[in-house]
Image: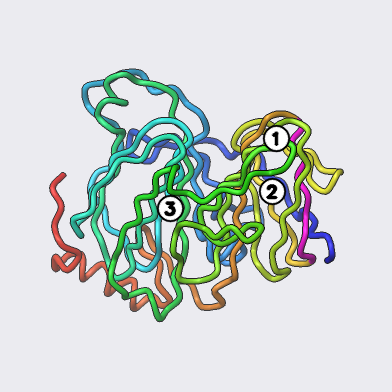
Amino acid sequence: MKTKNIELVIAPPPTHMVGDGFRVHNFIPSGRNLDMKRMSPFIMMDYNSKFYFPPTDQPRGVGVHPHRGFETVTIAYHGKVAHHDSAGNSGVIGEGDVQWMTAASGILHKEYHEEEFSKNGGDFQMVQLWVNLPAKDKMSKPKYQGITNDQINKFELPDNGGIIEVIAGEYENVKGTASTFTPVHLLNAKLNKGTNTSFHFPANYNTGLLVIEGSIKVNEKENIPTNHFALFENEGEIFTIEATENTIVLILSGEPINEPIAAHGPFVMNTQAEIIQAFNDVNMGKFGYLDE
């Protein structure tokens, strides 16, 4: 197999607040050759790098808002988030857990720091991805996958090298826990210092990684520090990661959805007419109801 090389390394962009509970770096889409199409099916990535939120009696977060046409995936590293949606789903995710919400035909939801976490305060660190849906599935029924860490299938690296958590897709014949609409690989690589391991994906898959903790060397030549994102070329299939210290790396790779993207606010469809229809449907109450 041919080596898959890095195309671009992106330092963490300046933070902004989403609601009052998420202090994020927005890596996708960004103005640096990383628009929605370039990393399709991953059309948005916000990263709340580790940040201390002080105690409060009023949980911080984002109030009721709609989505249509894609999925939201929240990966928790520190802190706890509570979720409620208009399809009747609710849950709390904490360290190591994943929330995979399929908005599809339309849903209202809200996300807040979990009550006890809010009262005690603490470090908060999470990634949220938007994963696009193909046109044939955009108006399918919403669903919710609340995946606790003990439900995530794992591959143990030899020689006490660490573990690969297979959230979706596959790694060394270990299947991912989450179900997906298109081929998506989503892996948490928790590597001990000195470990060198390889990853391989089809050449045409859009592939990137985010260093959550520690630092790594890719393909024995490029150093990637904490909180940096690396975008790979769409050539070659295999790359190596060496942990230059104990590290956590989020690796994402997926088959591009080669369809038009029409995006506006909380909606991602294929045409502007569908975006207008989404706004009309929300205003007419077709996304259901959810208390603030």
Q: Secondary structure at mark 3?
A: strand
As drawn, 77 above or below 153: above
Residue placed most toward the observer, 134 or 171: 171
Q: What is the CA distance from the residue labelled 1 to the residue labelled 3?
A: 29 Å
Which residue range is magenta in the image?
236-244
Q: Residue at x 43, y 76 (%)?
A: 270
Q: Does 241 appear in magenta?
A: yes
What residue would you read off at disc 1? 160
**Residue 230 — which label?**
2
- Which residue in the rendered view is the most extreme toward the bottom? 136
- What amino acid type is highlighted by mark number 1? Asn
Q: What is the CA distance from the residue labelled 3 to the residue labelled 2?
A: 19 Å
**In screen coordinates, is 84 left or right of 195?**
left
Q: What is the CA distance from the residue labelled 2 to the residue labelled 1?
A: 26 Å
Mark 1 or mark 3: which is in front? 1
Q: Residue at x 31, y 26 (%)?
A: 117
Q: Which numbered disc, 3 or 2, marks the residue that appears first in the sequence?
A: 3
Q: Provide residue 57's location: percent of width, then percent of height.
A: 21, 22
What residue would you read off at disc 3? 73
